[in-house]
Amino acid sequence: MRKHLIISHGNLAKGMLDTLTMFIGENKNYYAISAYADNCNPTEELNCFWSSINEEDQVLIYTDILCGSVNQLVYPKLSRANTFIFAGMNLPMLIQGSCLPDDASDEEIMKLADCGREGVVCMNNAEVQSYSEEDE
């Protein structure tokens, strides 16, 4: 089974999960840890998360900042088979992660980083198609 962990400084992780749920619905395979918010001890929360993981589970972890403290907390888990860590998460990356087929290859999973990069655009020079309210 594939499990997704969203972890951030402050309430970003829970906010991202809340917004993601608007797009994909409730999903029991997604977990959020908002480190250092509301007296959250991220080490304890991570221990609780990992206790729910089976050896055969695939785990995708999304963090807010490369080399930030929460990223450093999960980094040692890269030694675990079937574990992927993405730093600098964004909503397009999370949505695409929810669409991965059960038999997605490691390469397909790692392309989530490309999806995240493509989701960041400076709109000043971007060419976008205009939609009217009738189109929606």
Image (cartoon, grey):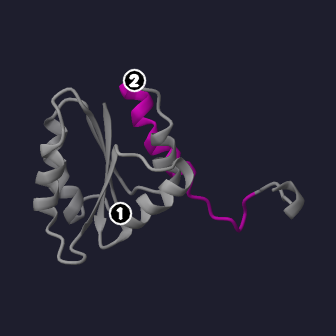
Question: Relative to 127, does residue 102 appear above or below in the rendering?
Answer: above
Which quadrant of the structure image shows residue 2?
A: top left
Numbered disc 2: secondary structure: loop
Disc 2 to disc 1, C-alpha distance: 26 Å
> Which is nearer the N-term, disc 2 or disc 1?
1
Taking the image as shown, residue 113 lies to the left or right of residue 54, namely: right
Q: Mark 1 points at which residue?
A: 13
Specify the segment rendered in magenta. 103-126
Q: Do the residues labelled 2 and 1 touch (CB within 8 Å)?
A: no
Is-magenta flag for residue 26? no
Mark 2 closeness class: few <14, some 14–19, many ≥20 residues within 10 Å: few
Taking the image as shown, residue 124 lies to the left or right of residue 85, namely: right
Q: Which of 110 and 40 is in front in this view?
A: 40
Q: Where is residue 73 in the image (x, y as percent from the top left)?
A: 15, 56
Q: Position of residue 90 (x, y in %)?
A: 46, 57
The N terminus is located in which quarter?
top left
Identified at 34% across, 72% down, the residue is: 11
Identified at 71% across, 68% down, the residue is: 124
Taking the image as shown, residue 127 lies to the left or right of residue 9, namely: right
Numbered disc 1: secondary structure: helix
Identified at 47% across, 27% down, the residue is: 101
Which quadrant of the structure image shows residue 56?
A: top left
Report the amino acid beneath label 2: Ser
The C terminus is located in which quarter?
bottom right
Q: Can you tell which mark lies on residue 62? A: none
Q: Can you tell which mark lies on residue 105? A: 2
Report the amino acid beneath label 1: Ala
Q: Position of residue 48 (x, y in %)?
A: 14, 52
Q: Which of marks 2 and 1 is in front?
A: 1
Is-magenta flag for residue 109? yes
Identified at 47% across, 41% down, the residue is: 98
Q: Nearer the viewer, residue 90 or 15?
A: 15
